[in-house]
Image (cartoon, helix red, strand yellow):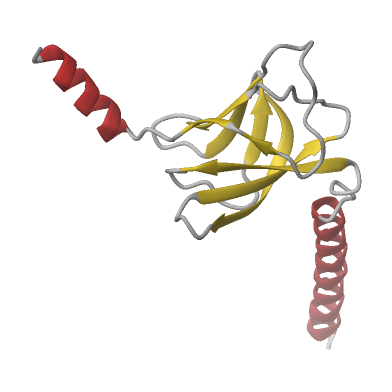
Amino acid sequence: MKKSYFETIIGTIIIFFSIIFLFVFFRSNSSDYISESYKLKAQFLKVGGIVVGNDVKLSGVKIGTVSDVSLNNDYFAVIEFYINNKIKIPENSTIMVNSEGILGNKYLSIIPGDKDNLKLKPNHEIKNVMDYESIEDQVSKIIFLATQ
């Protein structure tokens, strides 16, 4: 009889902590990030594996998150992302797809333009893009340069 009471108490404790864990997890992932940010977009020829939830970084510091990846009618990859309201991006900035290493996660990297230039407004598009270059693309460039 004591054994079944012990198992019931342990089961109740496990369920209690599981519910607390799920509550904390959903609360931390569903923050009001969208209300504290503005949306921008960019069109790429190749995005190299960018997915929803990837980071947007400026000088290596996370300033936003990718919210949507889709194709337009001209078969360009359109990436929409949110940027923190405190960060104002100049219009002449460049955006590119980077990797955190050979097998690392992909992220969008923004190279800021002239700080005296006009700032991008919500729902505007960054026009200066650098498409993703895979390792194969980079190696083929090196081989091509070596053969000339």
Q: Which residue reaches farthest left?
A: 147
Up the image or down, 115 lies above or below 133; here it is above
Left or right of residue 107, residue 120 in this image: right
Q: In which quarter of the image is the N terminus?
A: bottom right
Q: Looking at the image, which is closer to me, 41 or 62? A: 41
Instruction: Please state the horizontal and vertical placement of residue 40, each as a whole percent of the image.
Output: 72, 41
Left or right of 35, for residue 104 = left
> 65 or 113, which is in the foreground?
113
Residue 12 in the figure: left or right of residue 136: right
Within the image, what quadrant is residue 127 found in? Answer: top right
Residue drawn 86% across and 82% down?
5
Instruction: Find residue 132 and report its horizontal and vertical position in percent.
Output: 43, 35
Q: Is residue 136 above or below residue 16?
A: above
Residue 77 place in picture, x, y as percent: 51, 50
- x and y percent of residue 23 in the render? 87, 62
Please tell me which residue is depicted at 81% across the width and 41% down the height of the picture.
Answer: 122
Q: Which of 34 and 2 is in front in this view?
A: 34
